[in-house]
Each structure stands twice: as C-alpha cells, then as structure tokens.
Amino acid sequence: MAENNFSIQIYVESRYKLDRKRIKQTVEHVLKQKGITGPTEVSIAIVGSRKMRTLNNTYRNIDKATNVLSFSQMEGEATVMPDSTLILGDVIVCYPVAVEDAARDNMLVDRKISELVEHGLLHLLGEHH
C-alpha cells in the first residue's frame, strides 16, 4: 500500500489524543479520489482554541475559533512538472471545536476530525462551497 508518493506531516498539540493513522488514510483517500498520483506534500495541524482564534484574527479578521482553516501554498492555477512535488499547504483543525461539532452531530471525535481534514484538503485542491 506504500505505492504513493504522499508526504503527510501531522502536528498535534500534545494534550490532544487522536488517530493519526485515520488522518493519514483520509488524506490519501482524498488525493487518490481526486486523481493525484505524483509526489505531494500536505501538513495537518490539530490545535487548541487559542491558536485557532489567533489564526482567524490574523488572516481573516474573525475573533473566534473555527473548526478548520486551510492555507494554500499556491495561488491561482498550479503548474506541476512531472518530477516535482505538489506542495498543497496546511490544514488546521481546532480540536475543542471539533469535539463540540462531534457532540452536536452525534459522532465520534476522530470521525469528525477526519471530516474536517477532508473539508480543508478539498479547499486546498480548489473546491469551495
């Protein structure tokens, strides 16, 4: 199964317990589903409310923590040469907000985090709602 060239960095603030393997599988599934097969890098960060609120304040002028943010490393159309790595960017998930969302939606926290990672990754791939 290690036939892809996906580099998935996962950063988790130490106090949050979650299924890293599930996050990696979610990212791999989305990339494969979108037909991405070449070398690709993406970073996933699971952070607290204070960090997410700071990011929202800094980049969106929103003074609150939201469940997910995406920061693309590309602007406009991506042009990727066959031998180069596609660097998508960062998906940041706010763990406390994900816990609240999971409770509201009556689902496991790890499932909600996977859903938010997928949502953020789709934004990095150019899909917007």
Image (cartoon, rainbow, N blue to C red):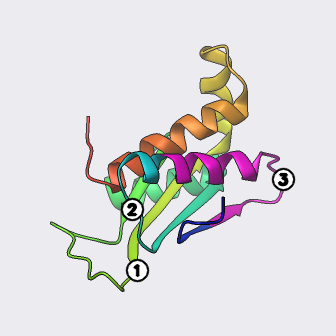
Tell me the quarter of the picture where residue 98 sits. top right
The question of residue 17 being in magenta is answered with: yes
* Residue topped by disc 1: 85
Q: At which x and y percent is residue 65?
A: 52, 43
Secondary element at tag 1? loop
Label number found at residue 15:
3
Secondary element at tag 3? loop
Q: Is 15 placed above or below 41 here?
A: above
Instruction: Give the Cα distance between marks 3 and 2.
Output: 24 Å
Residue at horizontal 42 percent and vertical 64 percent from the top: 37
Q: Closer to the N terminus: mark 1 or mark 3?
A: 3
Q: Quadrant of the C terminus?
A: top left
Residue at horizontal 74 percent and vertical 59 percent from the top: 13
Which residue of the protein is positioned furthest toward the bottom in this rendering? Answer: 83
Q: Is 55 placed above or below 66 here?
A: below
Dot 2, crowdedness within 10 Å: few (<14), some or many (≥20)?
some
Specify whether residue 49 is in view: yes
Dot 3, crowdedness within 10 Å: few (<14), some or many (≥20)?
few
Kind of residue sitting beneath label 3: Arg
Q: Nearer the viewer, mark 3 or mark 2?
A: 2
21 with respect to 64 (left or right): right
Residue at horizontal 53 percent and vertical 54 percent from the top: 92
Kind of residue sitting beneath label 2: Phe
Q: Nearer the viewer, mark 1 or mark 3?
A: 1
* Residue topped by disc 2: 71
Q: At which x and y percent is residue 8?
A: 59, 66
Dot 1, crowdedness within 10 Å: few (<14), some or many (≥20)?
some
Q: At which x and y percent is residue 126?
A: 26, 52
Instruction: Give the Cα distance between marks 2 and 1.
Output: 17 Å
**Magenta residue span:** 9-29
Specify whether residue 61 is in view: no
